[in-house]
Amino acid sequence: MCTDEVIRSYRGVGVDLQKEVHEDMAKNYSAYPRKWGTPRTRTDTNIDHRRVPNLMVFFTRKGESLEITDRADGYSPGDIVTWDLGGEVPHIGIVVDEKSAEGGRHLIVHNIGQGPKREDVLFEWRITGHYRYYEYLLAENVRE
């Protein structure tokens, strides 16, 4: 799943995003979408962090929602990008520091059912969200 790449990226730097999403949803459940056909009244720690719309809400609430732009230089390594693949099918990926040889744009780590890929796909689909969470993490770590 595409969300797994984001979750794993944060785990790689010592952040348990699954836990953080669950804790925020448990405290602020009404802020999160309920789009999956079941009239749930509480969180599900097994799946909630694996839904792009939930991550979009989480990053908006706990991180920084950034401008969506058609300029590649507006996206930095560590930024999270969400897209609509068409037909309201959401997708998510993370910008990495490696750049493409052809376009000179930062590559995106994402997964659309064929395993993790590192590709120049920033502008392949309609961008629906642009987030930054690492500055928030740095500020939190300074306070601890």
Image (cartoon, helix red, strand yellow):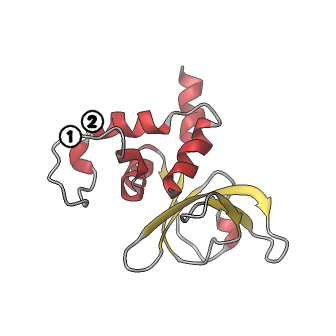
Going 25% across and 61% down the picture, which residue do you hit?
Answer: 35
Q: Residues within 10 Å of mark 1 (few under 14, many from 20)?
A: few
Going 81% across and 71% down the picture, which residue do you hit?
Answer: 104
Q: Residues within 10 Å of mark 2 (few under 14, many from 20)?
A: some
Horizontally, residue 35 falls left or right of residue 126, namely left
Of marks 2 and 1, which one's residue comes earlier in the chain? 2
In the image, residue 131 sits, relative to residue 125, either above or below, namely above
Depth order, front residue of 121/58: 121
Horizontally, residue 118 falls left or right of residue 1, namely right
Measure the C-alpha gap from mark 2 to mark 1.
Answer: 7 Å
Can I make out residue 134 in this image?
Answer: no
Mark 2 is on which residue type? Ala
Depth order, front residue of 125/4: 4
| The C terminus sits in image quarter | top right
Can I make out residue 39 in this image?
Answer: yes
- Measured from the top left, where is residue 54 in percent x and y? 36, 52
Question: Which mark, by number, is residue 33?
Answer: none
Mark 1 is on which residue type? Arg
Residue at the top extreme of this rendering = 144
Judging from the image, what secondary structure is the residue with disc 2 in? helix
Question: Which mark, by number, is residue 26?
Answer: 2
Judging from the image, what secondary structure is the residue with disc 1 in? loop
- Measured from the top left, where is residue 118 in percent x and y? 70, 61
In the image, residue 52 sits, relative to residue 23, either above or below, namely below
Q: Quadrant of residue 46?
A: top left
The residue at which mark 1 appears reads as 42
Q: Quadrant of residue 98?
A: bottom right
